[in-house]
Amino acid sequence: MDIFMDKVLCAECGCMQEYDIVSEKSERVWNGITCNFNKRVALCKKCGHRVYVPGMDDLNENEFDVKCREEHDYILVGEIEEILEKYDVDKRPLSKVLGLGEHTIENYLKGQLPSKRYSDMLRRVLGCYLYMQNYYESNKDKLNKHAAERLEKRLNFYDQINSHESKIEEVALYILNSKYEITNMSLQKLLYYIEAFAQVLLGKKIFDERCEAWAYGPVYPKIYSKYKSFGESQIIVDEIDLTDCLDENVKNIIDFVLGKFAIYNGVTLMDLSHSESPWKDAHSGYGKKEHCTELITHDAITEYFSAVNEKYDLSTDNGVKNYIASLGVI
């Protein structure tokens, strides 16, 4: 909700008056293009004449700029600020490492419109660290030692969380590149259900790594360690092209599982897994919150979910829905 002062001076009435905010169609030129824009206008409640409200013109200008940038696919000022945060880099070092004039990024942040070429370049840098890595290798000699160390540290971090040298890492990145908000807890459970559904519906393992029966449900230690720096927050990775890594059948299984299970948060997925025998059997003999690293075997997962599939038909939406409901968690 917009926050403006309750009353402003109406020149017509000669005193402070309340006002209404209405939309007014406006036609303006932006970057040589004529654009239509609905701007806010304030009208005196008593006489209906236009009044000036502090801050409204700035808001209109900002919204007009954002609307035009979005419609014509130019990077937003906020996205440039995200680049600075993502790579822990200041304005001038960012300009230098990208091969731009020293004050270019500073000017962009003040509202100057970049060329389409530079806008696209900045979008690529924001979307995938590999582009920034290339610029860094070419221009790191232009940075002072402190700026170079900060940027290199961030690049190493993104290299680590986006690496995919094993099949389970590819599956994890595919999940993290989906439309769902994924935490480390939910990621572990989704991998577990993907393993189960792949075996039942495809009849094969899609990765070899084993999960352990931790207190908070099934966990794949390698993947957990890889993303533990995110804590309980959403895991954010770069836009990684996995086209040549996962075949269509596997991607279909992942998408199917995500559609049925990724709609729940990590705690709910933990509760679901706690209701199933693969985790319960492996965790048997340990206290509810006691640390446990017992393996949940692939055979245990296959046996349990094969029986579930026979009863509910896990290849169907209703089958999965009915199975989840049978656990009594949701």
Image (cartoon, rainbow, N blue to C red):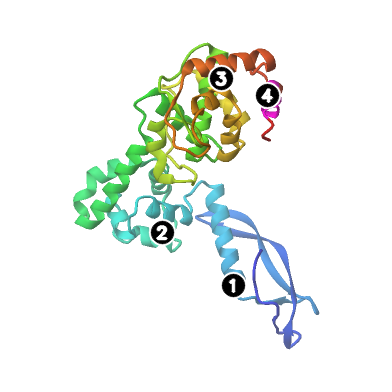
Q: Position of residue 291 (x, y in %)?
A: 44, 37
Q: Position of residue 93 (x, y in %)?
A: 28, 56
Circle 2 is placed at which residue position?
108
Q: Is residue 24 magenta?
A: no
Q: Which secondary structure lies at badge 4? A: helix
Disc 3 + disc 2, Cβ < 8 Å? no
Quadrant of the image for the C terminus? top right
Observer-nearest of 15 and 236 = 236
309 with respect to 240 (left or right): right
Q: Earlier in the sequence, mark 1 or mark 3?
A: 1
Q: Which secondary structure lies at badge 2? A: helix
Q: Amino acid at mark 4?
A: Tyr
Task: Kindly identify which numbered label has been placed on residue 323.
Answer: 4
Magenta highlight range: 319-327
Query: Tag 3: Cα neighbours inside 10 Å, few (<14), some, or many (≥20)?
Result: many
Q: Amino acid at mark 1?
A: Gly
Observer-nearest of 300 and 60 = 300
Q: Earlier in the sequence, mark 2 or mark 1?
A: 1
Residue 132 in view here: no
Q: Position of residue 95 (x, y in %)?
A: 31, 55
Q: Which secondary structure lies at badge 3? A: helix
Residue found at x 51% / y 17% = 300
Residue found at x 56% / y 26% = 255
| Above or below, comparing residue 166 to residue 200 in the picture | below
Task: Kindly identify which numbered label has been placed on residue 55.
Answer: 1
- Disc 2 from disc 4: Cα separation: 53 Å
Q: Amino acid at mark 3?
A: Phe
